[in-house]
């Protein structure tokens, strides 16, 4: 993904502050995890300040996230670890986690690009027209020698609007009918 944990935390801060699943108890668990396991990231004095129940949870969380961003990439990484350990459903719904999951596993949520017609974009009427023309040509070829003598002149006239190869075939067929 190329982003540092600090940049990811900057991006996830708005989501974390707005998320209602992070109540006072869960924020306290994350603060205690950071304080007990990594006292160099969150000292006792800082942990006490962030656990002050007189301050609303969203404000405490915002201050904690700002403090961790100031401490650097390692502190942000440890915050993500603590969040993953205590509040897994919130961790997996973070915008950066969703983007990372989608970029690493394209089969999990495949991108669907609707295509109207796979072979061409002309539609079903074009196909039916071409198919009808091909069937008509097949009937003329199969039954044409015995039954269609006057119809061959119509084929010669129809050849005027076609490409060179198609004109040659139709004119050749017309000439064959006249010679007989």
Image (spheres, rainbow, N blue to C red):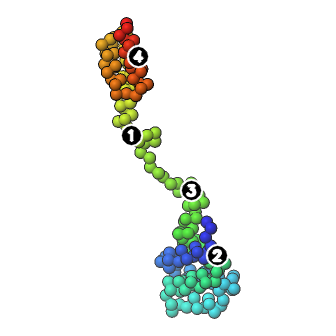
Which one is earlier in the sequence, the residue at label 2 or at label 1? 2
Depth-wise, is mark 4 or mark 3 nearer the camera?
4
Contact between labelled residues 1 and 2, with CB atoms less than 8 Å apart? no
Instruction: Residue 179 in the image: state x and y as whole percent.
Output: 37, 8
Q: What secondary structure is marked by label 4?
A: helix
List x then y, in percent, for residue 85. 62, 74
Q: Please identify, in this view, whether the residue under mark 4 or under mark 2 is nearer the observer.
A: 4
Count residues near mark 2 (Cα–Cα under 10 Å), then give few for <14, some for 14-19, many for 20+: some
**What residue is pinned by disc 2?**
77
Task: Tell me where residue 108 appears, x and y as whole percent.
Answer: 56, 56
Mark 1, residue position? 122
Residue at disc 3, secondary structure? loop
Where the N terminus falls, by quadrant?
Answer: bottom right
At a point 41% along the width and 21% down the height, the residue shown is 168
Mark 4, residue position: 172
Residue 37 seen anywhere in this rendered image of the structure:
yes
The CA distance from mark 4 to mark 2 is 80 Å
From mark 2 to mark 1, how far is it between C-alphas? 54 Å
Which numbered marker is on residue 106? 3
> In this orientation, which residue lies closer to the viewer: 150 or 97?
150
Query: How far apart, in angstroms, are the residues tagged by discs 4 and 3?
Result: 56 Å
Quarter of the image for residue 73 reads bottom right
The alpha-carbon separation of the residues under discs 3 and 1 comes to: 31 Å
Question: Nearer the observer, disc 4 or disc 1?
Answer: 4
């Amino acid at each position: 993904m190329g982003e540092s944990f600090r940049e990811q935390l900057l991006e996830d801060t708005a989501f974390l502050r707005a998320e209602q699943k992070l109540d006072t108890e869960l924020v306290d668990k994350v603060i205690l995890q950071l304080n007990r396991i990594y006292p160099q990231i969150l000292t006792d004095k800082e942990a006490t300040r962030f656990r002050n129940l007189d301050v609303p949870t969203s404000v405490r969380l915002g201050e904690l996230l700002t403090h961790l961003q100031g401490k650097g990439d390692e502190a942000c990484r440890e915050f993500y670890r603590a969040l993953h350990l205590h509040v897994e459903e919130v961790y997996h719904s973070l915008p950066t986690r969703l983007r990372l999951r989608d970029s690493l596993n394209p089969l999990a949520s495949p991108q669907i690009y609707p295509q109207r017609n796979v072979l061409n974009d002309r539609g079903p009427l074009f196909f039916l027209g071409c198919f009808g023309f091909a069937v008509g040509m097949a009937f003329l070829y199969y039954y044409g020698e015995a039954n269609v003598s006057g119809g061959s002149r119509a084929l010669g006239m129809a050849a005027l609007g076609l490409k060179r190869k198609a004109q040659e075939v139709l004119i050749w067929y017309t000439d064959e009918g006249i010679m007989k």
